[in-house]
């Protein structure tokens, strides 16, 4: 049996380990589109602020995959899946066949139609690669603009602030809000940010970004004109599922899976930030972002791929750190 | 990650621009004062699109060998490059093309063979080349641009080189190649910010790149070479090509003849007529030349035979290196047939060594076999060669007017060297023959004559020994581990010694361009000062070790590497460490 896993985040790595434990003779190949060994994404800001070294980000040793008998191919991007031929196609046109496939491609910040034309002026803050680039630029940066919601904006604001940068945060709403975070907590976070010197602009959005010499001129919907040395912006955080195009795998924003994490195409499973799973409370599909969920989904998908029948149980809360404070967000209600 | 030295390999097939990529990289590095060594490996077949690789190693300090492993593999042809991945160092990088059309099966995919401890850089080489030039030509320069960014090298060093290489093809070609370079650079800047940095010392003077074959040719010309005859053979052909171009400008001659027998015959003939003459060949050619070399020994005619060794026996491995021709050089003849055998160790040695070879041949009226090898002959390296026109240090011993009255071509002398004049000159009427002969040159088979003449021919070598310089001793003079090496293996030995030294183990090396005869007291003193002696060489039999064992009664640790690739310094250091552990017991 050949198992192919697309994505080397928490879900993919855990699935690979579980599969190998349950089917020691099975061949497991895991593809990661980043050029690094799996790392703790939630510690990237610590790395940016030099609180930890790059090596401390990696939560497995370089020998891990060799030791468990899994072939790890890093820096290799899967561009298409062919369910009929049970194969995947890589960026460089290599075709790899599978018997069981797991899609664990995660999510990423997206630019909408307003921001997309200014892509080349916008700095991403998502992957270790982004942080490596940012670390080089950081000493030459004084003024930063951040536009975007989601938990990663909290992380970024924290990192920039800790690095002593002058930060302006633009939000569309009447006040900063972050998904999954209680309104009271959002308010507390907002006050904390203001106290830390972060300038918050509400009920506005970036409409134009122009390069002027070494700086950027940013125009907003409400005719504000701002300047910055660097601009971080995104419209939303979405599952990264371009590889399923043309496969017939059912999707909404993310890949739709059943409680066994199997997609609408037999033999293809999905786990982590790229999936939408039915939420009985909401009576709708729901993307359950987050590290602990990804780990558990990876394990369950892995078990099911080896022929077992495990059901995914929802979780209530997730913990994360912000500016040294431990925060709890509710995931399921 | 900071690098003080880098080894970069381009791998592809004919038409991928592998060699030109290596040349641009090497020349760019030499241009900013770095020390460089370049090694090309290609298939033996002339037709078709065989695999070829070029490896460029560069550093601020002298590069003696190709080192162990490579930091970056540029896989221009996926399938051919798979076998090269094993040489990529841990944390090294592989560049591969994302733009290959059609399906690629896993077994043919370079990406599928990149282990996780190595970085893969998937770059659309073909697409970017097309963007630059409208064709897929220039993929190699996209890759050069990529590696420039990856190791934070200054782009100008490459752009200047691209201009120098392509300027004769016109402005447009220069522009498209620079554009291809820039696109590769920018692509990597966006997608692969690897944080690698090669440390460059500012203000270094540009260095000159030269191959062993080029240095050898240049050295011969500067030492008064007048006549060259040869027949093309890999890896020696370049010497003849250069001679054909340059010798006529100096009123000299270069002829390409029908085979190696004709080549050595022409050389012996030209030398008989009074000209400094040389040929260049490889192992199979040397076999064919052995009869005429023996005639030159018997007739005491100067001749220099360059043998750029390749893998053997027979036609063997035309494009791979080996040091397997020492025995034929030393002993490949009937009878007691002494000849000088020399082996240069680097390009500087090729330049100065061939001059010593020509001088010794002239002074002692003997054939000199000059054993270069494929790795040394073809590799390019930065070398500090101090050129000087006409470096002839000696001429043929002429008869005095009294001696000319009754000229004896093979007059018995104390040093074994008889006065020699060109036939046809006044008083110079004499016979030369392959038969044993009297002092006049007349054939004679009496035992007494043969004994006297054999002794005379060998006495020249005793005389020669007395004027040879002492062998060089390198490394830690007080070390107990000594290494005796020869030819191009010396570079790997020096670096192997450096690796061992970093681990706290001292060693020393005895190095001499002279294989036969040698400055024997240098060797005896060296061996007497060592508790362990290591003799590494690129052949199966241990040909140099056998010579040293017989000559100096030593019992060395022998390293026999029937090589296809240059010797690795790591192998040498391993043996040094083993010897050290034995001594420590």
Image (cartoon, coloured by chain):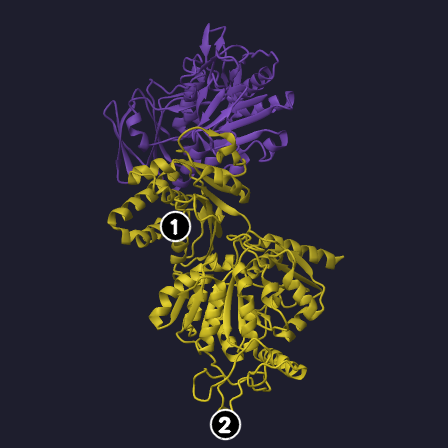
Chain colours: A purple, B yellow
Label 1: which secondary element:
helix
**Would you place residue B126 above or below residue A275 in this image?**
below
The single residue placed furthest to the right in the displayed view is: B585
- The spot of residue B22 in percent (x, y) is 42, 50
Q: Earlier in the sequence, mark 1 or mark 2?
A: 1
Tag of residue A142: none
- x, y (%) of residue B465? 60, 78
Q: In which quarter of the image is the N terminus of chain A?
A: top right
Q: Which of B162 and B497 is in front in this view?
A: B162
Asked if labels 2 and 1 touch by Cβ distance under 8 angstroms, the answer is no
> Which structural element holds mark 2?
helix
Characterize the local packing of mark 2: few (<14), some (14-19) or many (20 or more) Cα atoms within 10 angstroms: few
Res. A140 visible in picture: no
Q: Which residue is drawn at 51% across and 68% down?
A: B305
Residue B406, percent across and down? Answer: 51, 92
Q: In this view, does B448 lie to the left or right of B154?
A: right
In the image, is residue B232 above or below residue A272? below
- Give the quarter of the image for residue B182: top left
* Distance in Å between CA atoms under marks 1 and 2: 61 Å
User: How far across and down, in percent of the image, does residue B459 sit?
Assistant: 61, 80
The disc numbered 1 marks a residue on which chain?
A: B
Q: Name the one closer to the observer, A103 or A253.
A: A103
Same chain letter for marks 1 and 2: yes
Relative to B202, say whether A156 is above or below. above
Mark 1 or 2: the one toward you: 2
Residue B161 visible to the viewer: yes
Q: Which of A54 and A321 is in front in this view?
A: A54
Q: Which is nearer the eye, B325 or B37?
A: B325
Residue on which the image places disc 2: B402
Q: Relative to residue A210, is residue B149 depicted above or below?
A: below
Q: Using the image, name the chain to which the residue with label 2 belongs.
A: B
Residue corresponding to mark 1: B20
């Amino acid at each position: 049996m050949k198992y192919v896993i697309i994505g080397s985040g928490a879900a993919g790595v855990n699935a690979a380990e579980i599969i190998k434990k349950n089917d020691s003779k099975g061949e497991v190949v895991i593809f990661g589109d980043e050029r690094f060994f799996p790392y703790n994404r939630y510690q990237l800001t610590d790395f940016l602020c030099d609180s930890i070294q790059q090596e401390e980000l990696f939560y497995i040793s370089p020998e891990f995959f060799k030791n468990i008998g899994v072939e790890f191919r890093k820096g290799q991007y899967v561009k298409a899946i062919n369910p009929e031929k049970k194969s995947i196609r890589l960026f460089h046109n290599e075709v790899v066949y599978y018997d069981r496939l797991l899609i664990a491609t995660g999510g990423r910040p997206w630019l909408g139609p307003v921001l997309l034309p200014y892509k080349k002026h916008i700095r991403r803050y998502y992957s270790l690669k982004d942080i490596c680039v940012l670390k080089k630029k950081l000493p030459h940066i004084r003024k930063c603009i951040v536009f975007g919601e989601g938990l990663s904006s909290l992380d970024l604001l924290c990192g920039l602030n800790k690095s002593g940068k002058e930060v302006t945060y633009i939000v569309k709403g009447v006040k900063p809000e972050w998904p999954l975070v209680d309104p009271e907590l959002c308010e507390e976070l907002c006050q904390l940010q203001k106290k830390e010197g972060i300038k918050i602009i509400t009920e506005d959005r970036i409409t134009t970004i122009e390069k002027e010499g070494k700086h950027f001129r940013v125009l907003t919907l409400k005719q504000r004109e701002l300047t910055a040395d660097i601009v971080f912006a995104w419209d939303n955080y979405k599952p990264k599922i371009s590889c399923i195009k043309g496969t017939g795998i059912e999707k909404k924003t993310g890949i739709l899976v059943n409680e066994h994490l199997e997609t609408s195409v037999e033999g293809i499973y999905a786990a982590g930030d790229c999936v939408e799973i039915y939420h009985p409370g909401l009576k709708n599909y729901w993307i359950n972002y987050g590290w602990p969920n990804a780990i558990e989904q990876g394990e369950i998908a892995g078990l099911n791929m080896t022929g077992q029948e495990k059901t995914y149980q929802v979780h209530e809360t997730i913990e994360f750190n912000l500016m040294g404070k431990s925060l709890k967000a509710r995931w399921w209600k | 990650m900071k690098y003080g030295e880098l080894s970069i390999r381009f791998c592809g097939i004919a038409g991928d621009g592998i060699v030109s990529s290596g040349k641009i990289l090497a020349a760019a590095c030499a241009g900013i004062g770095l020390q460089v060594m370049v090694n090309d490996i290609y298939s033996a077949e002339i037709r078709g699109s065989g695999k070829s690789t070029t490896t460029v190693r560069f550093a601020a300090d002298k590069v003696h060998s190709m080192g162990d492993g490579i930091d970056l593999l540029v896989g221009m042809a996926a399938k051919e490059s798979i076998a090269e991945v094993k040489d990529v160092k841990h944390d090294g990088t592989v560049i591969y093309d994302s733009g290959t059309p059609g399906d690629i099966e896993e077994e043919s995919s370079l990406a599928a063979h990149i282990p996780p401890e190595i970085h893969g850089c998937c770059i659309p080489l073909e697409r970017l080349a097309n963007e630059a030039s409208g064709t897929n030509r220039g993929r190699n320069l996209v890759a050069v641009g990529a590696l420039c960014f990856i190791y934070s090298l200054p782009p100008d060093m490459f752009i200047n080189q691209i201009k120098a290489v392509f300027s004769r093809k016109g402005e447009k070609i220069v522009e498209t190649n620079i554009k291809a370079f820039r696109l590769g650079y920018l692509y990597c800047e966006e997608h692969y910010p690897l944080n690698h940095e090669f440390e460059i010392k500012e203000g270094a003077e540009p260095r000159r790149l030269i191959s062993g074959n080029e240095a050898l040719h240049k050295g011969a010309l500067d030492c008064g070479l007048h006549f060259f005859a040869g027949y093309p053979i890999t890896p020696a052909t370049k010497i003849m090509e250069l001679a054909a171009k340059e010798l006529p400008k100096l009123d000299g001659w270069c002829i390409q003849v029908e085979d190696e027998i004709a080549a050595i015959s022409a050389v012996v003939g030209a030398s008989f007529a009074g000209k400094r003459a040389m040929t260049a060949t490889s192992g199979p050619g040397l076999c064919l030349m052995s009869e005429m070399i023996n005639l030159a020994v018997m007739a005491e005619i100067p001749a220099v035979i360059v043998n750029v060794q390749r893998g053997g026996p027979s036609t063997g491995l035309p494009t791979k290196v080996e040091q397997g021709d020492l025995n034929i050089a030393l002993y490949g003849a009937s009878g007691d047939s002494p000849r000088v055998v020399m082996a240069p160790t680097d390009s500087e040695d090729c330049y100065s060594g061939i001059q010593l070879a020509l001088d010794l041949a002239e002074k002692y009226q003997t054939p000199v076999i000059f054993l270069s090898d494929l790795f040394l002959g073809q590799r390019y390296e930065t070398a500090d060669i101090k050129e000087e026109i006409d470096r002839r240090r000696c001429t043929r011993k002429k008869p005095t007017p009294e001696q000319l009255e009754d000229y004896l071509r093979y007059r018995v002398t104390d040093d074994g060297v008889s006065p020699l004049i060109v036939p046809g000159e006044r008083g110079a009427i004499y016979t030369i023959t392959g038969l044993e002969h009297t002092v006049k040159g007349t054939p004679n088979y009496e035992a007494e004559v043969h004994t006297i003449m054999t002794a005379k021919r060998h006495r020249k070598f005793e005389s020669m020994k007395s004027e040879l310089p002492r062998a060089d001793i390198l490394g830690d003079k007080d070390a107990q581990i000594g290494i005796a090496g020869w030819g191009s293996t010396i570079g790997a030995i020096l670096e192997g010694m450096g690796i061992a030294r970093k681990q706290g183990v001292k060693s020393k090396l005895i190095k001499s361009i002279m294989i036969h005869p040698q400055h024997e007291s240098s060797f005896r003193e060296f061996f007497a000062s060592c508790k362990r002696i290591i003799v590494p060489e690129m052949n199966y039999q241990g040909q140099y070790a056998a010579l040293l064992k017989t000559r100096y009664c030593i019992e060395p640790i022998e390293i026999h590497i029937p090589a296809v690739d240059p010797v690795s310094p790591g192998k040498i250091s391993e043996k040094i460490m083993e010897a050290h552990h034995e001594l420590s017991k």
